[in-house]
Amino acid sequence: MQNAIIIAGPCAAESREQLFLTARGLKENLAAKGLALDYFRAGVWKPRSNPGDFAGVGTEALQWLQEIQQEFGFRVCVEVSAPEQLNWCEQHDIKACWIGARTAVNPFDVQAIADAAKNRDFTFMVKNPMIADLKLWVGNIERFLNAGVTKLMAVHRGCADSNESVYRNNPSWETAIDLKVRYPHIPLLCDPSHIAGQRQYIAQLSQLALDYGFDGLMVESHYQPSAALSDKEQQLTPGELAEMLSQLQFKDIISSPAEHELRKQRTLIHNIDTQLSVLLSKRMEIVDSIAKIKAEHNLPVVQPEQWNKVVRMYQDNSLQDDDYQEFITEFLELLHQSSIKRQRK
Ligand code: PEP
Ligand code: MN
């Protein structure tokens, strides 16, 4: 996992103490695994969907982050959504900023920030917009390139559009892979925290991202996630993060267009598998509700006409070749037997 870019830190800067405890935890726990942070992240101005939610402590936190840079030797990055925030960052020697997914949907805002970045020495991490719109993401990258910004990275954090998966956001891996094909020299990072929404999925998403050819990760970490003022379900302690990173396998660099295409196709399969895994579980839950109704009303568990309708629907909607029809028949038989078993229980 040594060759990957690693950005980590809390969702939001909450207090000086929280930042110091988290930064120290990251420094020590990563060092114990032979790893080091490339950037320490913390949101100072937090864009929240609900107006009453914690919106960050604002400019006061820049002072604390400047101290973190000095004390731990980290480079710090924060989210910016308006040009004047670059001035405030600069005053505190903070030279790396990310564009958040909400700002990324507004070309006026991104252009204003890119204009303000001209002839200044900032590094930008450009997140994908909330929606899976490759053109908008590309447009944002172009705005920074046109402004002469050379230190650029892209960060994939999933999309908020139709999402039949266990994750908070749709992984939409193919959008990120397409961006990588277009800009092979711009490092592409994955933010598994905002895709996952739940810490239990962060390791699997991180490994998938590395398998798909991502160059690094931006992960949320808080010294005490249960006390976090935002995104508490998806933050890892520094110890958990270091352990996870040490177990990840960093794959070789993508070498050919065929390899790109293969990885992209795999991402599409993964999207489908995540949906299937959720849909099949949901289906079983509905089977349980049906079982209850049947039991209460003394109805038979097996109702052949009903099941035949299901089978016919699958046969009609499926690929029509013999091998596939054989597969779907066997699959449905398994599904049916499993439903009957659950209902009898
Ligand atoms: C964040 O990184 O804390 C954040 C708000 O991310 P996003 O813009 O991806 O939602
Ligand atoms: Mn967050």
Image: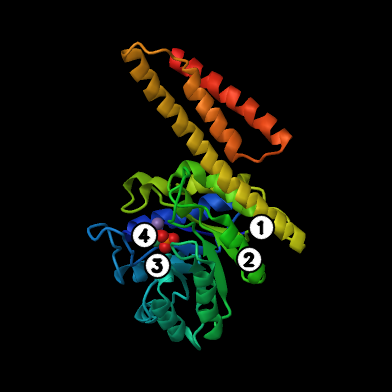
**For marks 2 and 4 on the same chain, the one whose residue lies earlier in the sequence:** 4
Nearer the observer, 313 or 140: 313
Q: Mark 2 is on which residue type?
A: Lys
Q: Is mark 1 on a helix, strand or loop?
A: loop
Q: Is mark 2 on a helix, strand or loop?
A: helix
Residue at mark 4: C-beta within 8 A of ligand 1? yes
Name the residue carrying label 4.
12
Q: Nearer the viewer, mark 4 or mark 1?
A: 1
- How far apart marks 3 and 1 lie (CA) works out to 31 Å
- How far apart marks 2 and 4 lie (CA) works out to 28 Å
Name the residue carrying label 1.
213
Name the residue at 56% across, 64% down.
Answer: 38
Q: Mark 4 is on which residue type?
A: Ala
**For marks 4 and 1 on the same chain, the one whose residue lies earlier in the sequence:** 4
Name the residue at 44% across, 17% down.
Answer: 343
Q: Can residue 244 be seen in this view?
A: no
- How far apart marks 2 and 3 lie (CA) works out to 31 Å
Name the residue carrying label 2.
180
Q: Is mark 3 on a helix, strand or loop?
A: helix
Which residue is situated farthest in the left direction here?
A: 52
**For marks 3 and 1 on the same chain, the one whose residue lies earlier in the sequence:** 3
Nearer the observer, 62 or 301: 301
Name the residue at 73% across, 34% down.
Answer: 323
Question: Mark 2 and 1 residues: CB-CB less than 8 Å, in contact?
Answer: yes
Q: Mark 3 is on which residue type?
A: Leu
Give the side of residue 330 with respect to residue 19, left or right.
Answer: right
Neighbour tally class for label 2: few under 14, some 14-19, many 20 plus, Cα within 10 Å: some
- Residue 74 spot, x, y in % from top left: 50, 65
Give the side of residue 45 with respect to residue 194, left or right.
Answer: left
Neighbour tally class for label 1: few under 14, some 14-19, many 20 plus, Cα within 10 Å: many
